[in-house]
Image (tube, grey):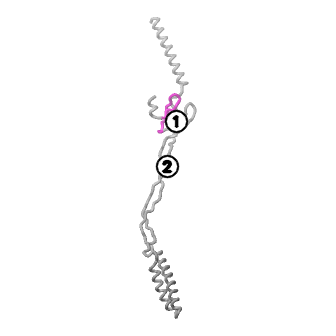
Amino acid sequence: MNKSTIMGFAAGAIAATAVGGVAGYHALHSPPNYAQVLAVHPAVETTRVPQRVCREVAVSEQAPARDTNRIAGTAIGAVVGGVLGHQIGGGSGNTLATVAGAAAGGYAGNQVQKNMQQSDRRTVMATRCRTLYRTHSRTVGYDVTYRLDGRQGVVRMDHPPGARIPVKDGRLITAPDNAQQS
């Protein structure tokens, strides 16, 4: 072998050793390429959704009165009261007894008709509604606890990571698209 070949091998060996040493130094002293995932917890958002629920129910109500002024009860009561008052009174007191009987009978007839109208009930179907609340839960992200350079941290991600999270320039790459670009 000639001297230049030996010198070439020696220079190449020295260069390879130097490059390997520098690469090894950077591998030992450069920041890691991944953060270790310690725990993943889904972040859940719960909302209450109102829902209106209606149904038909039987309802008892007062029947509408045909004679709202209670004229029939008043008139019949006045006639009956007047007849009874006329039979009770005698002489000049007969007229007074008839008038008093008619007035008392009219009032009594009016009240009897009023009580009958108030107790007259009918059943109708009515819609009754109420608001019920339905609970809805959805996952809005994932709270990830990780370890990087001996320190522990938490980051929210939109997807569950695997066992590790990529790191570039000392920062976590949390979006899947960013990890593929590096």
Range drawn in magenta? 158-174
**Residue lying at 54% horizontally and 27% vertically, measured from the top left:** 31
Q: Quadrant of the N terminus?
A: top left
Question: Where residue 46 sits: x, y (%)?
Answer: 50, 48
Q: Nearer the viewer, mark 1 or mark 2?
A: 2
The quarter holding residue 54 reads bottom left
Disc 2 target residue: 47
Density class for disc 1 (Cα within 10 Å; few <14, some 14-19, many ≥20) is some
**Residue lying at 50% horizontally and 84% vertically, measured from the top left:** 105
Residue 113 vs residue 103, the one in the foreground: 103
The vertical placement of 127 against 15, above or below, is below
Residue 142 vs residue 114, the one in the foreground: 114
Q: CA distance from mark 1 to mark 2?
A: 30 Å
Residue at the bottom extreme of this rendering? 91
Residue 123 highlighted magenta (yes or no): no
Residue 165 highlighted magenta (yes or no): yes
Query: Which three-letter amino acid code belongs to the residue tagged 1?
Result: Val
At mark 1, the secondary structure is strand
